[in-house]
Image (cartoon, rainbow, N blue to C red):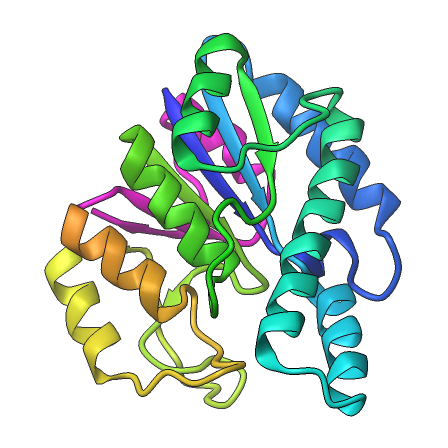
């Protein structure tokens, strides 16, 4: 099974490095790596935002801010990769990533292509498309998809399963903007819908084991 995991920087470094989360994540990956090919894409999280904010105050433009964010994702990737004893170098293209995956079970990466406004979700979805992943898993801060924002509405209904068609309808209704709270950002949502990439949204990393085993888990499946 080919699995792409989008691991937000806020999971790795919420305020400071979450050592216990990384240890837990390592144990989960150890349990699912045998017989599978896994790509873990790390985001920049609060570290990237703090660095970018500082540059912005100094009057640096978007290009410099994007470059800094790009490198922070790779810094987080190096941390995760060291925990997993995986790759020491990172792919500079999806083609290079695919070659690495042919030689090893796990590839950890941050941003791959240096593009303006590229996100962790978007990068992960593009990689899932390129390597023809069996499943794309997005680890988020909510247990899955709701019919409306559960942080704002107490009566929000959880959606355990949804079709690509219905998911596309929800995505098309949303006016995306920087900092938008949704289970996937706009680019990733469009890529998985257009290419029909089976996608799982979940909060608990232990669900990765259940997903691989085909067991029931708490989260949303888009298929």
Q: Nearer the viewer, residue 151 or 78?
A: 78
Which residue is at a point 68% across and 57% down the rendered structure image?
Answer: 9
The answer to whether 221 is drawn above or below residue 60 in the figure is above
Which residue is at a point 67% across and 28% down the rendered structure image?
Answer: 89
Q: Can residue 118 be seen in the rendering of this structure?
A: yes
Indicate the position of residue 34 as horizontal and vertical percent values.
53, 10
Residue bounds of the magenta highlight:
196-223
State left or right for residue 163 relative to residue 159.
left
**198 part of magenta stretch:** yes
Q: Quadrant of residue 58?
A: bottom right
State left or right for residue 198 relative to residue 98.
left
Q: Nearer the viewer, residue 71 or 73?
A: 71
Which residue is at a point 24% across and 43% down the rendered structure image?
Answer: 197
**99 part of magenta stretch:** no
Count the numbered circles shown.
0
Q: Can residue 163 be seen in the rendering of this structure?
A: no
Indicate the position of residue 47 as horizontal and vertical percent values.
78, 65
Indicate the position of residue 188 as horizontal and vertical percent values.
34, 59
The image quadrant where one finds the N terminus is top left
Q: Nearer the viewer, residue 149 or 199?
A: 199
State left or right for residue 208 relative to residue 126.
right
Q: Quadrant of residue 109?
A: top right
Which residue is at a point 43% across and 60% down the rendered structure image?
Answer: 144
Indicate the position of residue 218 as horizontal and vertical percent values.
46, 49
The answer to whether 49 is drawn above or below residue 213 in the figure is below
Q: Nearer the viewer, residue 35 or 39?
A: 39
């Amino acid at each position: 099974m080919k699995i792409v995991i989008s691991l937000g920087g806020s999971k790795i470094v919420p305020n400071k490095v979450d050592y216990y989360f990384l240890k837990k994540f390592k144990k989960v990956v150890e349990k699912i790596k045998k017989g599978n090919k896994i790509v873990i894409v790390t985001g920049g999280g609060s570290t990237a935002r703090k660095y970018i904010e500082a540059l912005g105050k100094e009057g640096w433009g978007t290009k410099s801010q994007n470059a800094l964010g790009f490198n922070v994702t790779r810094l987080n990737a190096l941390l995760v990769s060291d925990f997993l004893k995986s790759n020491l170098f990172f792919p500079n293209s999806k083609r290079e990533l695919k070659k690495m995956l042919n030689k090893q079970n796990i590839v950890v990466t941050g941003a791959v292509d240096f593009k303006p406004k590229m996100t962790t979700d978007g990068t992960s979805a593009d990689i899932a498309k390129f390597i023809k992943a069996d499943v794309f898993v997005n680890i988020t801060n909510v247990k899955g998809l709701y019919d409306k924002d559960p942080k704002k509405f107490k009566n929000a209904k959880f959606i355990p399963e949804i079709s690509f068609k219905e998911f596309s309808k929800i995505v098309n209704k949303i006016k995306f903007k920087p900092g938008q709270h949704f289970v996937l950002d706009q680019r990733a949502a469009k890529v998985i819908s257009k290419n029909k990439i089976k996608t799982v949204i979940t909060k608990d990393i232990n669900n990765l084991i259940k997903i691989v085993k085909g067991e029931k888990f708490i989260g949303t499946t888009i298929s």
